[in-house]
Image (tube, rainbow, N blue to C red):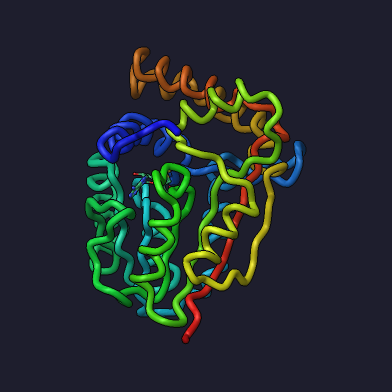
Amino acid sequence: MENIGAADIGLHYDERSPITDELRGGQVHMWYWYDDQDDAPLEEAVHRITRKVTDTLGLRPGERLLDAGCGPGETAVFLARRYGVRVTGITLSAYEIKRANERAAASGVAELARFLYGDYMALPFPDGSFDAVLALESLQNAPDPARVFAEFFRVLRPGGRLAFSDFSLESAADPDRLAVFMSTLKLPRLPTLQEWLEYAGDAGFKVEEYTQCGPRVFGRKSKYIQAAMSRRQELLDKFGEEALGEFAGRHRGFFAPRKDQIGYVIVAAVKPRG
Ligand SMILES: C[S@@+](CC[C@H](N)C(=O)[O-])C[C@H]1O[C@@H](n2cnc3c(N)ncnc32)[C@H](O)[C@@H]1O
């Protein structure tokens, strides 16, 4: 297993998030297209994932939500506005903290959504301090998933809910292609759906819902490439040749696997009341 430290992950997102933020409307995560004829714009396709994952939490006004691995803040801002929840977002990226706090202020929810540096391997919060925890495509970088799930369990109150989404391994054929994908994204491992469910179960969570929608996510990679290419000149003007070249290079590694090798899992679980 490759050993990747918190500082490396923070830098990885400092570099990766600005262009992704621009392309995907502040959401540094995947998209969901029903079929190749689906003409939803990229930002909407990405927002479908935001809604699909967070809908499983059943949030209510005033609840305390931890957004663990919050990216540049669009998901938290959306949830604060839509449900009136109080969100604490943590990330390892200085860029993301700054961008997320600016976004919350610009959207008028700075009172409800705050963002700070934090490592989900050792959460700086007391036991039982949240009603819900969200990890939207952030667990992929976890050096020790068992420890992270134990931390989520600890900071949730009894009856609190967890939702997470991430890549899953669907076929280990073509290991070289997988290795490029994993090193590009800085993934220490790529669990199967079953392994993801076991991490949650072993920490004490009761899994209540899960789905594997990889064919509509990674499987639609060509639609994403098309959408990104249509904005190439605009991105070039804003970020410059060097940054865009580096970003495009990373995409080559990201899209190295076959469509059917990379799944996408969404899991909802609860901390039993005892
Ligand atoms: C793929 S991005 C997803 C961001 C956001 N959830 C979204 O959907 O837009 C992964 C996020 O996980 C965060 N992350 C990775 N490892 C982390 C750790 N050990 N502790 C806290 N956040 C972490 C990164 O800083 C980044 O914000």
Q: Position of residue 78 (x, y in %)?
A: 42, 60
Quarter placement of the N terminus: top left
Taking the image as shown, residue 156 lies to the left or right of residue 54, namely: left
Residue lying at the far bottom of the rendered structure:
274
Quick one: 39 or 144, which is closer to the camera? 144
Q: Decide if residue 26 is in sight here.
A: no
Measured along the vertical axis of the image, is residue 230 above or below residue 148? Answer: above
Q: Quadrant of residue 92?
A: top left
Q: Position of residue 98 (x, y in %)?
A: 22, 45
Residue at x 48% of width, y 19% of height: 248
Question: How many badges with numbers are in the image?
Answer: 0
Measured along the vertical axis of the image, is residue 181 above or below residue 44? Answer: above
Residue at x 67% of width, y 57% of height: 211
Residue at x 35% of width, y 34% of height: 4
Q: Decide if residue 258 is in sight here.
A: yes
Quick one: 59 or 144, which is closer to the camera? 144
Q: Position of residue 101 (x, y in %)?
A: 24, 53
Residue at x 24% of width, y 67% of height: 125
Quick one: 60 or 228, which is closer to the camera? 60
Measured along the vertical axis of the image, is residue 24 above or below residue 221? Answer: below
Q: Quadrant of residue 223?
A: top right
Taking the image as shown, residue 253 lies to the left or right of residue 37, namely: left
Q: Quadrant of residue 236?
A: top left
Taking the image as shown, residue 272 lies to the left or right of residue 61, namely: right
